[in-house]
Image (cartoon, rainbow, N blue to C red):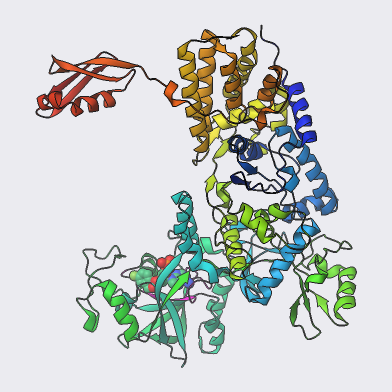
Amino acid sequence: MHKKFDHISIEQKWQKQWKEQRIYDVGTRDKKREKEYILVEWPYPSGNLHIGHWHAFAVVDIYARAARMKGKQVLFPIGFDAFGLPAENAAIKHGKNPDIWTTENITYMTKQLESMGNSFSWDKTTQSTDPEYYKWTQWMFTQFFENDIAYRGTAMVNWCPGCNTVIANEQVHNGLCERSGDEIIRKEMPQWMLRITQFADALIDDLDTLTEWPEYIKEAQRQWIGRSRGAEIDFPLSTGDSVTVFTTRPDTLYGTTYLVLAPEHDLVQKHKASIKNWDAVDAYIRATATKDDVTRTKNEKEKTGVCLIGITAVNPANGESIPVYIADYVLKAYGTGAIMAVPAHDERDFAFAKKYNINIISVIDSETIDELPTTRVGVLKNSGPYDGMHSEQAKKAIAEHVGGRLTNTYRLRDWSIGRQRYWGVPIPIVYSPEGVPHSIPREHLPWHLPTDVDFTPTGEPPLAKSSELKERTERIFGEGWTPEVETMDTFVDSSWYYLRYLDTHNNETFCTQENQDAWLPIDVYFGGSEHTTMHLLYSRFWHKALYSLGLVAETEPYRKRVNRGLVLGPDGNKMSKSKGNVIDPDAQVTLLGADTVKMFLAFMGPYGEPGSYPWDVGGIAGIRRFLERVNGLHEHKISTQENTETTQLLQKTIQKVTSDIMLYKFNTAISALMIFVNHAEQHGLSHDSYQTFLRMLAPFAPHLAEELWSNEGNITSIHNELLPVADVTKIITKRTTIGVQINGKMRGTVEVDTDAPEEVVFATVTQDSLLNSRLTGEVRRVVFVPNKIINIIVQ
Ligand code: ANZ
């Protein structure tokens, strides 16, 4: 019988000891050692750790521990992204102040995180709601404001009547608020904006320098930014003024048979008096206001619009008069908010023109007729002097001819960061009696979030109801001065937290240059794929904005990025309360132990590849059995000697495990450990090998490895040991001779590694010049008996 694997007492004992001895604290940078800055996305304090958190943190801990055991100085910090709407909504629901609610959750979740037994750098922890943190969020904002990166602008926003606030595009699904389910309303509002578009080119171009990022993540960011090269062209209107369109296809100008303005385009209201069918136009504008951009621009959506009767435009290429429409498939906020429509070569225009019986003139030579537009470039026709010219040349020639301007347009919009809610960083702005915004000087930061606030949402920002904030503003800045009452989007808080970890307790600066030099860039950033375009892009922008002000030394924060996959419920569906398929990690930890849960999550699949893995009850039991066998190994299998096969297998295992960890293939590393334990159980192993094995196990099962290590009489932590390094001279692979037949006749032999697969054996045959010379003709079939014979049939 194995000595009982009492995971509860083992795990509690070592967690306590590690915490008391603070063995994972980082302290200051030790230049004698190589550094590794490993970042995981800081969690939002929802109140309970779920399996996703375990997958995000516990599995990465394997990597962090392995890096530490390679002798590196590892920074592996954790903190809390604690501001935000969910906290506020939950606080309202539970009748508690968001501050108290958040603090309670953080206390509880910190305990849960400790039960994970991770090697977090707890000495560097921080949270976005700490005034010593948000002081710097505010200070950075003031720097941006003074340098025109932050500005007061107007933007078309998504207003959620349920949440009583503006919400981000990403939080709108099919026109509904992701949180409250209310139908959103699109409206123009004055907003605090960050000029992310000024960095759009750098955000795209610098992706090429991120050679260790997966290509699919970079491509997603490029698409999100959406750089289009094209031209702006002016079309004179019958009203006397003109409308500017953005087009990527100026070469199709001769095929332009109508114009479309976004329903919200300024010119529509301006020419209200000239528009004869105003009632229909006005009704259409109102209907559009409830639709979000994604729904509006869906290709398959039926095209609708209204002609502006009383207004016409002139095609500047051929002088023809063309009608002007409004239609919701044209967006106000993209390009110029107006398009030249070319139904013969654009699918949406084609569908629209068919529906409203508008002229379709083909200007690109193609086979396509009638039913379909050709969207490809080609040789021009029906284009006056440009007939016969190729599109690529014509784009420039035609644009220039009509006085157009070559320009880029981006899908990315400036980032609107103001929120009319309570639980966020107060925007550090005060207004003079004349209403001019001023940034709050550094000596008054942190600009505290007032507490005398009724935070029930009413549409009016809660901070507007604070008399303390009002009095504070007048006391410091003078009578008649008023505070900004909006708070910041939480994506702001998480845009720079990786810098604060480097200097958490500094109240002179957000992070010294010395600490930046010591630790940046982040060597690897592990996160969820849902952050590929938002957080990951925002924080790259933030870093570049800081760089433009000389506040950081490099243009990019993250050297590598790894997106993990998704853990599904046992039924193969996404875990959700309504489906009843949620696995509670705490219960699993109590039942089976933190080491088991962590190893099981690591065993699910390659960590660095997008994929989804159902929770497999049998699988986790298998991991638990494996650890029980490891626990029992020392009792009767260890002797002073071992056979050479064991020695060789150990070296092979070391090689496999250490290289797989670095490739985030924790699953195959665990398989190798299992193979070794199987072997050791049958053949026994030496004390030395046993201890080597434990060091290899330590990143995966840190508690059990520590326990067994101390049972061996070691008095210092196994986690201060080094990972074993494979002695390749001891890895001798067995060779086997295989008979080679050609068309059934024995023609010779080849020597290959034992168990070599057919492809390897076949390749070896073709590399043998004598055998290869007999392989005349086409190979029809291969008959292969592993370790014995290969018969190649040729004709
Ligand atoms: C004429 C044309 C002819 C166009 C043609 C395309 C094909 P991307 O590549 O996504 O940037 N467009 C411009 N502004 C728009 C807006 N605010 N809302 C909806 N559509 C808009 O797309 C650029 C093209 O999308 C532009 O080029 C314009 O249609 C349309 F054969 O102009 B094109």
Residue at 78 percent across and 30 percent down: it is 17
Say if 309 sits above or below 99 in the image.
Answer: below
Q: Which residues are the magenta region?
A: 326-345
Residue 545, quarter of the rendered image = bottom right
Pick whichever, 794 or 637, lies toward us. 637
Residue at 9 percent across and 28 percent down: it is 776
Q: Where is residue 295 in the image (x, y as percent from the top left)?
A: 52, 60
Does residue 339 show up magenta in the picture? Answer: yes
Question: In terms of image quarters, where does ligand 1 lie?
Answer: bottom left
Pick whichever, 307 or 441, lies toward us. 441
Q: In this view, does 216 lie to the left or right of 477?
A: left
Q: Where is residue 107 in the image (x, y as percent from the top left)?
A: 81, 42
Residue extending farthest bottom: 240
Say if 221 sits above or below 565 in the image.
Answer: below
The quadrant of the image that shows the C terminus is top left
Q: Can residue 172 be seen in this view?
A: no
Magenta region, main secondary structure: loop
Q: In this view, does 330 lie to the left or right of 117?
A: left
